[in-house]
Amino acid sequence: MNHNTRYWMAGFAGVALLGVGLAAGYGLAVLRSTPTMTPTTADATAERQALYWYDPMVPDQHFDSPGKSPFMDMELVPKYADEMAAGGVRIDAGLQQNVGIRVALVERGRLSTTLRVPGTLTWNLRRESVVSARAEGVVTSVMVKAPYTAVRQGQPLALLLAPSWSSALAESAALQQADSPAARELQAAARRRLHALGVPDQAAANDGAVTLAAPADGVVTEVLAREGETVMPGAPLFRLNSTATLWLEASIPQADVAALRPGTPVQARVDGLPGETFTGTVEVLLPQVDPASRTQRARIVLQNPRGLLAPGMFAEVNLDAGQAPAVPLIPTEALIATGDDSRVIVQDTDGNFRPIRVRIGRSSDGRTEILDGLVGGEQVVVSGQFLIDSEASLSGALGRMDTDPAATKAQP
């Protein structure tokens, strides 16, 4: 074999080996590119069952199959069953710490039942009296001429000369001197006539004028009598108001009206009288609501034994509404209020979070009454609840809250 023959044989062998190497490499590449389904992978894929598909921009809308979103130019995202907690929402502990999720214990108790509202003092019209002319006559003298003069019971106010009274008084005075049985009967008849004519008991008949006196202690708030004028029967001459008690009219918010009733104790303070406290009771809730402020007026009878209070004063009213029954109390910041309802996020003992619809009552000092939905002892989220509420909406937990009675009220 010459030199050229050996050269060609070596070249052919090299080409053959190169072909074998290429074939082996291609086979290995094909083998590696072919997907292999191991039993473990198959089980994991079977377990991750997609419940529905959704558009992350519109999470409330669910779809039964994958595809393009009708809202955005993007693929729908699957929601797997193992991503949802039973009956609520599961959030990773690390994420809870990162977003600052905090919970608080729901305690049973009572909010402060003391209401603080403004009020205005007025005269107690039940203690008002009017001195009027009971017969036609002439005012001969006026003893009290200035309004807001303090008077005592029985103090003379004016003298009234009435002809009908004068004759009746003269007849009664003449019969006082007789002592026979017939005269005594006439005396009784004369007294009845004086009473029918409205002659005051303390009237004097020396000159025929009758003294009009104050019927009780108080203040003469209106003087209508003028000396020398002729008055007709029933004409008012003086108006008196008592200072022993005053009316305090307070504006009560509608939410607090139900806690008040006649007899509810009251304490009032006036800026002009520092250190002084005046007591009283609610007399009646007036059947009138102010449409602008949505408040209802309460009429309070306030004691004024030393006469320090005066109508027109403004007062700060403290009303003790009594002991209300204990109810679950939550921090007000835990509430998620919408236009339709209110709800809270409760953390179960297994760490899951779920929304619960609640019916709220009054709020005071950062706490709110829960009238329905919680019983006490639950853990409610007070920080980060809006994130959980959004996830609950995404997972359909809010929809189950509407249909599942067990999800709408915590169990004790």
Image: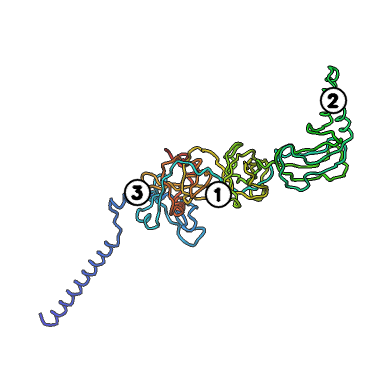
- The image quarter containing residue 280 is top right
Write the residue at 48% across / 54% down.
59
Residue 47 image label: 3
Q: Which residue is mark 1?
A: 275
First in residue order: circle 3 vs circle 1: 3
Q: Left or right of 341: which side holds 287?
A: right
Binning the other alpha carbons within 10 Å of mark 2 as few (below 14), some (14 to 19) or many (20 upward) gives many
Label 2 sits on residue: 190
- Mark 1 burial class by Cα count in 10 Å: few <14, some 14-19, many 20+: few
Q: Work out whether mark 2 precedes mark 3 in sequence or the reverse, and give the earlier one.
A: 3
- Residue in the image at 46% along x and 50% along y: 334
Q: Nearer the viewer, residue 319 or 246?
A: 246
Tell me where residue 87 appears, x and y as whole percent: 42, 44
Q: Nearer the viewer, residue 26 or 287?
A: 287
Report the residue at 15% width, 80% height from top: 7
Q: Which mark is residue 320?
A: none
Count of numbered labels shown in the rendering: 3
Question: Please, what secondary structure does the residue beneath circle 1 have?
Answer: loop
Q: Amino acid at mark 3?
A: Glu
Reading the chain from its start, which is encountered first: label 2 or label 1? 2
Distance from the alpha carbon under mark 2 to that under mark 3: 113 Å
Q: Is residue 215 left or right of residue 135?
A: left
x and y percentages locating residue 173 in the rendered image: 85, 28
The amino acid sitting under disc 1 is Gly
What kind of residue is marked 2? Answer: Ala
The residue lying furthest to the top in this view is 181
CB under 8 Å between discs 2 and 1 = no
Quadrant that contains the C terminus: top left
Pick whichever, 356 or 53, lies toward us. 356
Outermost residue toward the left in this view: 1
